[in-house]
Image (cartoon, rainbow, N blue to C red):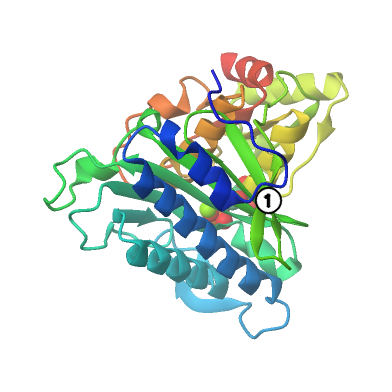
Amino acid sequence: ENSRIALPVGTNLDRFIMKNQESFPFASGELSQLIRDLAYAGKVVNREINRAGLADITGAYGADNVQGEAQQNLDVAANIRFTRALQKGGEVAAIISEENEDIIDLNTPSAKYIIAMDPLDGSSNIDVNVSVGTIFSIYRRVSPVGSPVTMEDVLQPGTAQIAAGYILYGSSTMFVYTTGKGVNGFTYEPSLGEYLLSHQNMKMPEDGTIYSVNEGGSKSFPQSVTDYIDKCKDRGYSARYIGSLVADFHRNLLKGGIYFYPSTAKAPNGKLRLMYECNCLAMIAEQAGGLATDGKQRIMEIQPTSLHQRVPFFIGSKNMVKEASEG
Ligand code: AHM
Ligand code: MG
């Protein structure tokens, strides 16, 4: 099932991509370049995050993003960094981003790929020095190359992702991605400026003892969800909630656990966005042996109808997600 070439721990990301590109589903050189562009922009964003407490770039930007949330300077900076890197790289026809209401058409009609991304998720955590992340999905456009990008190109279900990944700006910075042949994690070595292979062929434990949910909303959770939380408590599970999706997911990926954000009175469809938060992590989870649902159906099979649509989200260790989703 995992046909990747085994490479020693410490192999750098560029070499890893090069050695494995023959197993990519499509024109390999272009997808390789695209992943390198994302990784590079991640280094730049990492540098800016590390300086956030020093440089005059923290705090509210004075504008709201499309969801009406206070936008932080670093959200804007990260959005610009990634967009610019992808524009220069030339492999991407369009981007959908949490920070932009409409499709960002890069005016490169001969490019084959579409990116959905949240350039800086959990950014309200930056001012308090807590981990944040970048989330990305890569699709191949469905309309003919050379023609203008269409809504159909961007509104593809998660099952159509050809690659997905995240960057976690944590106590170490990590780049974790999949092209559909397992999940590999690279840790950033800042003095070398390189991501080094540190977590090969990551597998999520099928069971776990961690549950991650903002229980402050539990008065309006569906009954099935409060029942599940009670079961977690009866079993003495640990509650862990950072409030940064990538960080919460990453911990559960390594240790075994479940993250969920169900519907609430405040957020009737849940809070998280299907296109650039849920699908990506769902692909990583499934590639690592885990599962992701909206409480009923597999996240990756949901046909998206709008760019910023929200869904209830249950993700993590297979058996835990099954139990929480059964209702
Ligand atoms: P954001 O995209 O505005 O940063 O919101 C997403 C974040 C996730 O990282 C996190 O899991 C969730 O919102 C936390 O929400 P809450 O504060 O309601 O628990
Ligand atoms: Mg987000």
Q: Is mark 1 within 8 Å of ligand 1?
A: no
Residue extending furthest toward the bottom: 56
Q: Nearer the viewer, residue 176 or 53?
A: 176
To which residue does mark 1 refer?
A: 196
| Residue 132 image position (x, y, % from top left) | 65, 57
Q: Quadrant of the N terminus?
A: top right
Q: Is residue 197 visible?
A: yes
Depicted 125 relative to depicted 2: above or below: below
Query: Residue at image x 41%, y 53%?
Result: 33
Q: Nearer the viewer, residue 96 or 190?
A: 190
The local secondary structure at tag 1 comes to strand
| Residue 182 image position (x, y, % from top left) | 56, 29
Depicted 218 relative to depicted 90: above or below: above
Left or right side of 168 for 164: left
| Residue 20 image position (x, y, % from top left) | 50, 37
Query: Residue at image x 70%, y 65%?
Result: 192
Amino acid type at mark 1? Leu
Query: Residue at image x 55%, y 29%?
Result: 4
Res. 234 image quadrant: top right
Q: Residues within 10 Å of mark 1 (few under 14, many from 20)?
A: many
Q: Nearer the viewer, residue 87 or 214?
A: 87
Res. 151 image quadrant: top left
Left or right side of 249 for 23: left
Q: Quadrant of the C terminus?
A: top right
Q: How many marks?
A: 1
| Residue 79 image position (x, y, % from top left) | 45, 66
Q: Nearer the viewer, residue 222 or 323?
A: 323
Query: Residue at image x 72%, y 82%?
Result: 54
Q: Is residue 271 visible?
A: no
Residue extending furthest toward the right: 236
